[in-house]
């Protein structure tokens, strides 16, 4: 079965640089979520989109922005990178409009290292 | 603000033993999920619990939900080494909303 695809899988950036992370949800899923997981921590919600509209916003820094495109893929744009942005970034997708089970399926993650 | 607490945070057990991981949460919700994460890997969905009294079992793992007590448990039966991983519970307040995760329980099963 198709899974959530994320690219790139690994990314190394310098401080103050920008980065773009991409997410391709499971086909026919209508909701995309972004989470950030620091070393030894639990995943923290950043932002989500339902049918290409922002549906919820969590602890996402103002330096970050995200959008979902007409083909349902999503991109997380990160600017003025800081050392503390080094983390594993997960995208998850779910089918909310099914009205029942809405398991969020997680992608493999993008490991971002800021030097 | 929704809070989700797991205990224990670290669990070292011998193969063949049984143990339970607890997940408490602070809001009324009947949507609770359990995930498994291997080091540096993604989160794998284990169980979805959507109503009070829900019980689900898969292999040596069994999860239950008590919405009145705001408590979920993940019971491990006759542990084997392959179960070594970090287990997260996560609560979803409403349909389509974010997941709020517990701190995770790092399980190590020793031969």
Image: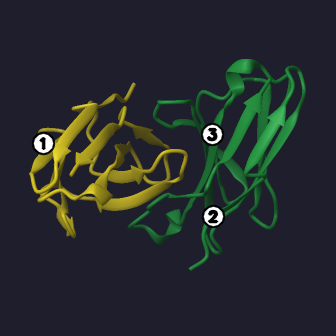
Q: Which residue is mark 2?
A: A4
What's the distance in space between the residues labelled 2 and 1, CA to CA? 34 Å
In this picture, is A31 found above or below B110?
below
Q: Residue at x 87, y 25 (%)?
A: A14
Kindly report which numbered mark, 2 or 3, lies closer to the viewer in this rendering: 3
Give the letter of the chain under mark 1: B
Label 3: which secondary element: strand
- Where residue B76 appears, as percent x and y from the top left, is 16, 54
Q: Give the colour of chain B.
A: yellow
Residue A88 is labelled as 3
Q: Is residue B105 left or right of residue A61?
A: left
Question: Mark 1, residues whose alpha carbon is within 10 Å: few (<14), some, or many (≥20)?
Answer: few
- Where residue A15 appears, as percent x and y from the top left, is 85, 20
- Where residue A41 appears, as percent x and y from the top left, is 47, 30
Chain coloured green here: A
Answer yes or no: is residue B65 visible: no
Q: Which residue is mark 1?
A: B68
Give the letter of the chain under mark 2: A
Q: Residue at x 68, y 42 (%)?
A: A111
- The quarter of the displayed image where residue A113 is located: top right
What's the distance in space between the residues labelled 1 and 3, CA to CA? 34 Å
Question: Mark 2, residues whose alpha carbon is within 10 Å: few (<14), some, or many (≥20)?
Answer: many
| Color theme of the render | by chain
In this picture, is A60 found above or below A21?
above
Label 2: which secondary element: loop
């Amino acid at each position: 079965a198709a899974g959530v695809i994320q690219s790139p899988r690994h990314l190394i950036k310098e401080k103050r640089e920008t980065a773009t992370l991409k997410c391709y949800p499971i086909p026919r899923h209508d909701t995309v979520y972004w989470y950030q997981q620091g070393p030894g921590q639990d995943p923290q919600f950043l932002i989500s989109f339902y049918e290409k509209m922002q549906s919820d916003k969590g602890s996402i820094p103002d330096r970050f922005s995200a959008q979902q495109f007409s083909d349902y893929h999503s991109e997380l744009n990160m600017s003025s990178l800081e050392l503390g942005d080094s983390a594993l970034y997960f995208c998850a997708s779910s089918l909310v409009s099914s009205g029942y089970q809405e398991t969020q399926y997680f992608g493999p993650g993008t490991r971002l290292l800021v030097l | 603000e929704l809070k989700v607490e797991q205990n224990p945070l670290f669990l070292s057990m011998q193969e063949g033993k049984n143990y339970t991981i607890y997940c408490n949460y602070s809001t009324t919700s009947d949507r609770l999920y359990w995930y498994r994460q291997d080091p540096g890997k993604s989160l794998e969905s284990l169980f979805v619990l959507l109503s009070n009294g829900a019980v689900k079992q898969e292999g040596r793992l069994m999860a239950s939900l008590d919405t009145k007590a705001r408590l979920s448990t993940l019971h491990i039966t006759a542990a084997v080494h392959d179960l070594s991983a970090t287990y997260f519970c996560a609560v979803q307040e409403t349909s389509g909303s974010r997941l709020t995760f517990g701190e995770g329980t790092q399980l190590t099963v020793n031969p």
